[in-house]
Amino acid sequence: MILYLLTLTDTELSYGNHSEDFDIGLFATEQQAEDIARNYLQNVQGFCEFPCTYRIKQKAVLGSEDDKTPVFVWMVQGWNTNEAFDEIDVIESDCFSTEAQAKNELAYLKHQYEREEWTITRWKIDERCWQEGFIRMDGQFPR
């Protein structure tokens, strides 16, 4: 089974090896992810006022017994931070149908990669994690 991770990126705040990303959600179809991306870029405050783009990544669901779309999946991410405390060197796993499988993947990835921070995130399929846009704080400007 494949899911589609929708990520919006503020290109003006991205630089070097840092990408100012907003993971919007995991969706059952690529078309659904594209429709949501277009809506955010045209209508959602914060995303429509700034130069944002989107990308959709295919994510396999590992450990699933059937082809039914699960309600929840888990994904592992690791990253380092730079001197500005921005996340860099981000790695992420595919999706897992159980938290126990994700914990096993976390142990494996920690062995393979040195990262300062690690997380296991539970995602509800077809849920938008960013319901609203964002505003920039004073001092946030293109690098």
Image (tube, helix red, strand yellow):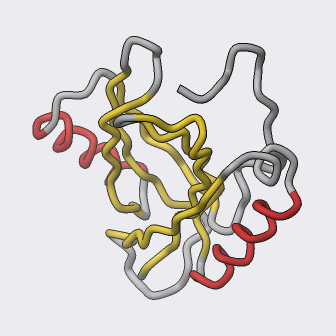
Q: Is residue 2 above or below residue 121?
A: below
Can you name the residue that lies furthest to the left here?
112
Q: Is residue 113 left or right of residue 76?
A: left
What number of labels is visible? 0
Q: Position of residue 127 (x, y in %)?
A: 71, 61
- Which residue: 34% across, 49% down? 92
- Residue 126 x/y as whole percent: 68, 68
Q: Nearer the viewer, residue 99 or 129?
A: 129
Q: Residue at x 70, y 67 (%)?
A: 37
Q: Nearer the viewer, residue 5 or 14?
A: 14
Q: Percent x, y for residue 51?
A: 68, 50
The residue positioned 25% from the left and 48% from the top of the image is 105
| Viewer-side residue, 137 vs 132 | 137
In the depicted view, which residue is nearer to us: 89 or 69?
Answer: 89
* 3 left or right, relative to 12: left
The N terminus sits in image quarter: bottom left
Q: Is residue 1 above or below residue 121?
A: below
Q: Say whether residue 104 is left or right of residue 108.
A: right
Image point (70%, 14%), residue name: 139
- Where is residue 142 shown, x and y percent of the image? 60, 29
Q: Is residue 37 left or right of residue 21?
A: right
